[in-house]
Image (cartoon, helix red, strand yellow):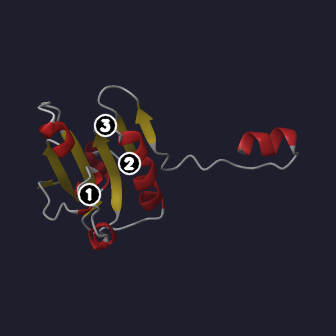
Amino acid sequence: MAFVETVFNANPTPVDHDLIPTAIFTQPEFGTIGLSEEAAREREPIDVYCTSFRPMQRNFAGRPDRVLMKLVVSRASDTVLGCHIVAPGAGEMIQLAGIAVKMGATKADFDRVVAVHPTMSEEIVTMKEPVRGG
């Protein structure tokens, strides 16, 4: 839309390239926004919240698929610096998580959200203890 506005409507519109949600449509999908655990650790002390599980719908079908979700959180400000998802539908999930991360949501903001059960995405708001820091 910025290109269209700039080129065709003579309305120069800058693009904000900071915190762009990205998805890779492999099997399983991969979605990411923000800093990786390693990049965040180079900038400041962090806490990493992570979960890996077999989703119910796959488990009932006898499939061994696993899901991974990770939040990278600033220890000083509690701001979510990165969100990473490997799961079926990760592209859809990261688009929505991207809104929160772009807005500067904190881990406490994520924790206040009521989980929709039974969904894979509920795990992103139910991770209570960091699995590692740095």
Q: At numbered mark 2, what does the secondary structure look like: helix, strand or loop?
A: helix
Q: At numbered mark 1, what does the secondary structure look like: helix, strand or loop?
A: helix
Q: Measuring from the top left, give residue 99's x and y in whole percent.
A: 47, 58
Measure how far apart labels 2 and 1 are at the Cα level.
10 Å
User: In this orientation, which residue lies closer to the viewer: 22 or 34?
Assistant: 22
Is there any visible trace of residue 59 in the rendered image? yes
> N-terminal of the two: label 2 or label 1?
2
Measure how far apart labels 1 and 3 are at the Cα level.
14 Å
Is there any visible trace of residue 39 in the rendered image? no
Direction from residue 50 to residue 113 in the image, left or right = right
Residue type, label 3 = Pro
| Residue at x 13%, y 39% (from the top left corner) | 60
Query: Which image quadrant is residue 122 in?
Result: bottom left
* Mark 3 Cα shell of 10 Å, populated few (<14), some (14-19), many (≥20): many
The reply to whether the C-beta atoms of the residues labelled 2 and 1 are less than 8 Å apart is no
> N-terminal of the two: label 1 or label 3?
3
Q: Quadrant of the C terminus?
A: bottom left
| Residue at the disc numbered 1 | 122
Measure how far apart labels 3 and 2 are at the Cα level.
9 Å
Q: At numbered mark 3, what does the secondary structure look like: helix, strand or loop?
A: loop
Q: Measuring from the top left, give residue 27's x and y in whole percent.
A: 31, 26
Residue type, label 1 = Glu
| Residue at the disc numbered 2 | 93
Direction from residue 80 to residue 61 in the image, left or right = left
- The circle drawn on residue 88 is 3
> N-terminal of the two: label 3 or label 2?
3
Residue at the front extreme of this rendering:
61
